[in-house]
Image (cartoon, grey):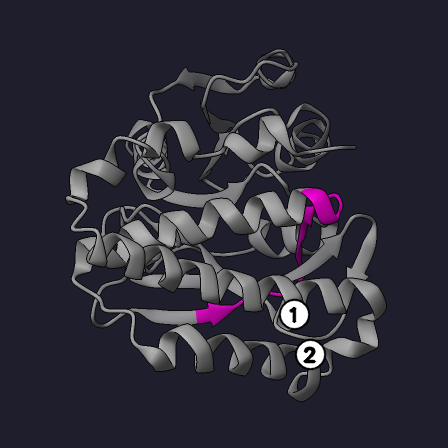
Amino acid sequence: MATVSVVIITKNEAEMLNRSLAMLRQISDDIIVIDNDSTDDTLTVAASNGCRIYPKNWDGYGANKNKGIQLAKHDWILSIDADEIPDAELLNTIALLQLDDNKTVYDIPFRSYYGSKLIRFGTWGRDHHIRLFNRIHVKWTEPPVHETLLLPKKSTVKKLTGHLHHYSVSNAKEHEAKTLLYSRLSAIKYLQSGKKAGVVKLYIAPLFHFVKIYVILLGFLDGKEGWNIAKMAFKNTWLKYHYLNKALHQHHPQSTYQHELPVMAYKFNADARVE
């Protein structure tokens, strides 16, 4: 068995987590669950699968992932989200890794789903992320949303075979709720970094993202789901700059938005997910 710890942040993902843990136990003897007040059977599922469970206050996606990394038994970390499931090919690939260079990071291909439909085109059809790394050199950034990994300057990126299967949204209702949440969190992130919302960002950027996803990257071939993905990309881009512009013009202090983070974060999982 590879000396890898798995870190998962959770909020009401019992069914998906049960499927994922059945696979992950094949490669790890140390699975850490950082839970954000789940009210379903998430904690029962995690406990029955031998996970180490830590109910934590919500401090943001990156911050809670870093909490899990610090609690891990092993230095090599496989970081996944609760709506992602590894396939057998990916697990076999990880099990055979030597993991002898702690500055090497591993990029994993994704297969993304809209409900039960596999999305083959657009940005979702080309998704991949670095998710396997050594915590000695790597950690997550901690913005309100869209956390990224801080990599060492001389890191080597290697691509793995197999996939993480990402069940991103169950339906259009959840997709819209997620879009609204992320656009607000993005506005907070931009406010913190001193970003501005000009005419180009408000009106040109949303249209560009729609055309790129739906036309250039052939999102229309995914049918109504491809249309919804492109439409929500347009909406997300416009809304995040709209919220930012509104905050800047109304002179809202940063703290006005900061106090909303624990309430907004992951809220859509409890309120909008319909299985």
Whether residue 265 sits left or right of residue 12 in the image: it is left
Residue 199 in view: yes
Amino acid type, label 2: Tyr
Amino acid type, label 1: Ala
Q: Residue at the location (37% across, 82% down)?
A: 200
Instruction: Please provide the residue range marked out in magenta.
Output: 158-173
- Residue 53 sits above or below residue 176 on the image: above
User: In this orientation, which residue lies closer to the viewer: 161 or 114?
Assistant: 114
Q: Earlier in the sequence, mark 1 or mark 2?
A: 2
| Residue 172 shown in magenta | yes
User: In this orientation, which residue lies closer to the viewer: 212 or 85?
Assistant: 212
Q: Are marks 1 and 2 in contact (CB under 8 Å)?
A: yes
Residue 169: x percent and y percent?
Answer: 68, 47
- Residue for badge 2: 214
Quadrant for the C terminus in the image = top right
Residue 112: x percent and y percent?
Answer: 69, 58
Q: Could you give the CA–CA distance between mark 1 and mark 2, rounded to whole angstroms?
A: 6 Å
Mark 1 secondary-structure assignment: helix
Residue 126: x percent and y percent?
Answer: 63, 73
| Residue 161 shown in magenta | yes
User: In this orientation, which residue lies closer to the viewer: 171 or 73?
Assistant: 171
Residue 102 in view: no
- Residue for badge 1: 230
* Residue lying furthest bottom: 216
